[in-house]
Amino acid sequence: MRQRKDDFKPRNDDASFERVHTVPCAATVEVLERVRAVVSVQLTGKNAEAFLIELGVGFHSSVPKP
């Protein structure tokens, strides 16, 4: 699923302001929450921290810059 440029543009109706997250954003958060849950069961301490840091850095660097 790709993020569209117009996903960030609020519409002028009241209903659009009720939606806090875009569909791609919500899907990404769901996947990251699942990963975090698995990591918290399978890894501990510095291993969990190192894995999550690498995941975050990789994720951040993969996001296209405007």
Image: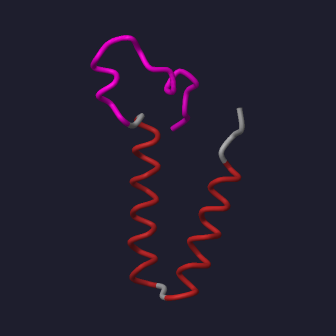
Say which quarter of the image contains residue 18: top left
Q: Is residue 5 above or below residue 58?
A: above
Q: Residue 32, percent across and down?
A: 46, 59
Q: Is residue 38 above or below residue 65?
A: below
Residue 18 counted in the magenta span: yes
Give the magenta range. Answer: 1-20
Q: Residue 52, percent across and down?
A: 56, 71
Could you tell me how many numbered marks the image carries? 0
Q: Is residue 40 above or below residue 44?
A: above
Q: Residue 30, percent across and down?
A: 39, 54
At a point 34% along the width and 24% down the height, the residue shown is: 17
Which residue is farthest bottom?
Answer: 45
Q: In which quarter of the image is the C terminus?
A: top right
| Depth check, front residue: 40 or 9 | 9
Q: In this view, does 66 lie above or below 32?
A: above
Residue 17 counted in the magenta span: yes
At a point 55% along the width and 27% down the height, the residue shown is: 4
Instruction: Determine whether, in the image, residue 23 is placed left or right of residue 50.
Output: left
At a point 49% along the width and 26% down the height, the residue shown is: 7
Instruction: Determine whether, in the image, residue 54 is placed left or right of residue 34.
Output: right
What's the coloring here? Answer: secondary structure
Q: Residue 39, percent across and down?
A: 46, 77
At a point 50% along the width and 21% down the height, the residue shown is: 9
| Depth check, front residue: 2 or 55 | 55
